[in-house]
Amino acid sequence: MIDHVYISVTNIEKSLTFYAEALKPLGWRQLGNFAAAAGVPDLFGLGDDVYVSGTGVGSSIWLRDRQPSETGLYIGIACATNEAVDVAYAAAINAGGIDEGQPAERAYFGPGYYAANVADFDGNRLEFVHKAMND
């Protein structure tokens, strides 16, 4: 689980579409926007079911316009099963993501570590991961 992450992108609309489709199989959806205030830039949000419903501590991602000096971001997204990793990876690829590691066991990280890696068109990276050792 991740509480929240900011991702700087070059095209908000295209990025919102990518992340919404890539994360849809995991119960994520667009949740709204925050206008710039107090040094915080305009933010465009996506969240998981728990975060969006407000029924507990969930996770969210906020997209913002990338500034010239910024670099990409890497985020690990927890998945409940290996199958969830597979489905999220396929959705991300179908949404235009770039393969950076198909779903597979990553035993070098530990027993039961199953993951897939995808990059978006701005160089930001998602790792969908199920850690069976934590089940």
Image: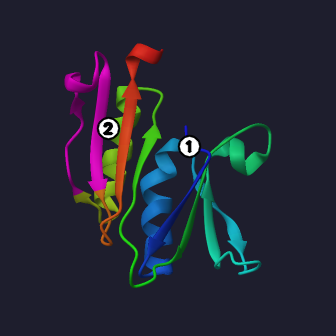
Residue positioned 20% across, 42% down in the render:
102
Quarter-wise, where is residue 81 in the image? Answer: top left
Circle 2 Cα neighbour tier, 10 Å, few/some/many (<14 / 14–19 / ≥20): many
Quarter-wise, where is residue 119 in the image? Answer: bottom left
Residue 39: numbered disc: none
Residue 86: numbered disc: 2
The image shows residue 109, relative to residue 13, as above or below, that is above
Q: Is residue 109 magenta?
A: yes
Q: Amino acid at mark 1?
A: Ile
First along the sequence among labels 2 and 1: 1
Residue situated in front as seen by the camera: 114 or 88 = 114
The image shows residue 91, relative to residue 111, as above or below, that is below
Residue positioned 79% across, 45% down in the render:
54
Q: Quadrant of the N terminus?
A: top right
Residue carrying label 1: 2
In the image, is 83 to the left or to the right of 99? Answer: right
Residue situated in front as seen by the camera: 38 or 42 = 38
Residue 32: where, in percent of width, then height?
A: 70, 68
Q: Residue furthest right?
A: 55
Residue 61: where, in percent of width, then height?
A: 57, 58
Labels 2 and 1 touching (C-beta < 8 A): no
Residue positioned 36% across, 70% down in the render:
71
Q: CA distance from mark 2 to mark 1?
A: 19 Å
Residue situated in front as seen by the camera: 92 or 40 = 40
Q: Magenta region: which residues?
A: 99-118
Query: For the residue labelled by badge 1, is the local secondary structure a helix, a strand or a loop?
Result: loop
Q: Amino acid at mark 2?
A: Asp
